[in-house]
Structures are given as structure tokens and as C-alpha cells.
Amino acid sequence: ETGVTQTPRHLVMGMTNKKSLKCEQHLGHNAMYWYKQSAKKPLELMFVYSLEERVENNSVPSRFSPECPNSSHLFLHLHTLQPEDSALYLCASSQDHPGRVSGTQYFGPGTRLTVL
Amino acid sequence: RKEVEQDPGPFNVPEGATVAFNCTYSNSASQSFFWYRQDCRKEPKLLMSVYSSGNEDGRFTAQLNRASQYISLLIRDSKLSDSATYLCVVNKGAFYNQGGKLIFGQGTELSVKP
């Protein structure tokens, strides 16, 4: 399935590095999301973009910086991360319609990030 | 209190067994409800939406009780391929121009044995 793709699939970085995660959705959706999944913890919503505008920042530290240049692409820019930021970062998309509850979210395969 | 609570399991059952998962949520304003499935080291995938009237998809039956803020999933005649983590998911913020705000439970692990 290639509805939502993410690159890279694995990333190892030092605390002083700057890197970016990329997400692309091929479903024609108008909302995109970043989630974090740490070991033994529920998925946590980080950011929501709807119609290319950020509508939710779920108290995420500023060392994570999202960017949504268009409705198909979403980036997560990383800088000066901490070892506790090591996790699986998942991107998702959905199609939202006026006057209706937000649609089902479809997830990408994730980027497994290790911060040394 | 967690916003969405599930029994983490694991549930170890033989093939053919019936297994039930329960979930409670704390926000009475929640808009929509889902069960997702997550295989080991894979992304979550939608299993089914959950409606107040109850809904069935093959061997899977989901129920929602808004008054009790309780969601359930029943799997009948379980297969080896049903082994996965089942995630109870609640959508808190759900209108056009706002995107969805999914709140995930920690998941219930199911292992189906031959």
C-alpha cells in the first residue's frame, strides 16, 4: 500500500544534528497529522494541518518544527533533540468535509528515530 | 485519569475462541470512535468505526454506549492472523477546517495460538 509514504524509514542522529522527516500522501486528502509513538505508550498527536494551515500544536517542544508546503506533503524538522525523543514518528492524512465529522485517518509506515 | 483506557493484556487465546476487548473514554464530547489494529512494528490501520447502534464486519462486532462512555470489540472464531495490538480510538475534535484529533488508548495485545 502506498497511500501515505514516509522517508526515511530509519534515522539515527546525534543531539546536535538537524534532520527532517518527510511525509507524502497520495490520497487527495486535505488534512495531515504527525504522531509520536514511544515504547509502551499510546500514540500521541503532535500536530494537525487542515487545508495547509496548522490547527493544532499539542504542546510539542520547539525542537520539533512542522512544515506543510501543500496538501500532499508534510515535513517534521528536527534540531537539538534529546535521547528521550527516540520513538516511531507516524504521519497520517484524512479527508474532511464541510459540516461533517473528520474522516478516517490513514497512517504511513513511520520513521523510527534514534537520538544518541 | 487517561482519556482512553484499555486493558493492555496480553490476551492469549486458542484458534476459534471468542475474545472481547473493552475500552472507556473520559470526554463525553467525543465525536466519533474507532478500533484500529497495529501489527508489530507496523503502522496502525483502521479496523472499523464504532456506532451507537452497533456494527458488525464479518467476525468483528463493535458496540458503543455513549451513556457509559464505553466501547467494545468482539472477535469471533479467532484466527492466527488476528494476532496484533488492538487500539481503541476516540476523535475529540472533528470539524471541517480543524482536522481530527484522535486520542489513542494504549492498546490491547492479542495472541492467537494454534
Image (tube, rainbow, N blue to C red):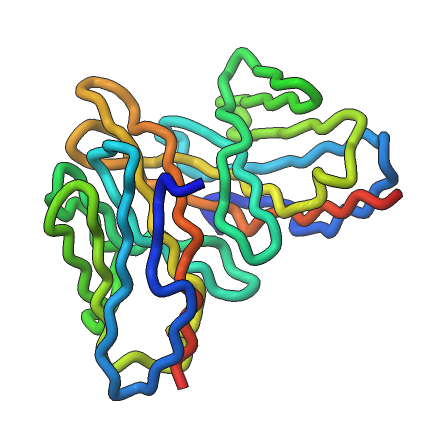
Residue B79 percent location from the top left of the image: 78, 34
- Would residue B99 be found to the left or right of residue A106 on screen? left
When the figure is inspected, residue B106 is found, relative to residue B60, above or below; the finding is below
Q: Which quadrant: the N terminus of chain A?
A: top left
Name above or below for residue A56 compared with residue A95: below
**Vertically, is A82 above or below B99?**
below
Image coordinates for residue B17, horizontal then vertical, percent: 84, 32
Q: Residue at x 20, y 43 (%)?
A: A72
- Residue B78 higher or lower than A71, as above or below: above
Which residue is nearer to you in this view: B23 or B87? B87
Quadrant of the rendered image containing residue A59: bottom left
Q: Nearer the viewer, residue A84 or A21?
A: A21
Is residue A82 shown left or right of residue B1? left
The quarter in which the C terminus of chain A is drawn is bottom left
Q: Position of residue A55 (x, y in %)?
A: 16, 45
- The residue positioned 39% from the left and 38% from the top of the image is A106
Picture coordinates of residue B40 (x, y %)?
A: 61, 55
Residue at horizontal 60 percent and vertical 49 percent from the top: B39
Residue located farthest toward the top when viewing the structure as drawn: B53
As rendered, which of B89 and A64 lies closer to the eye? A64
Tell me if A66 is positioned left or right of B56 in this view. Answer: left
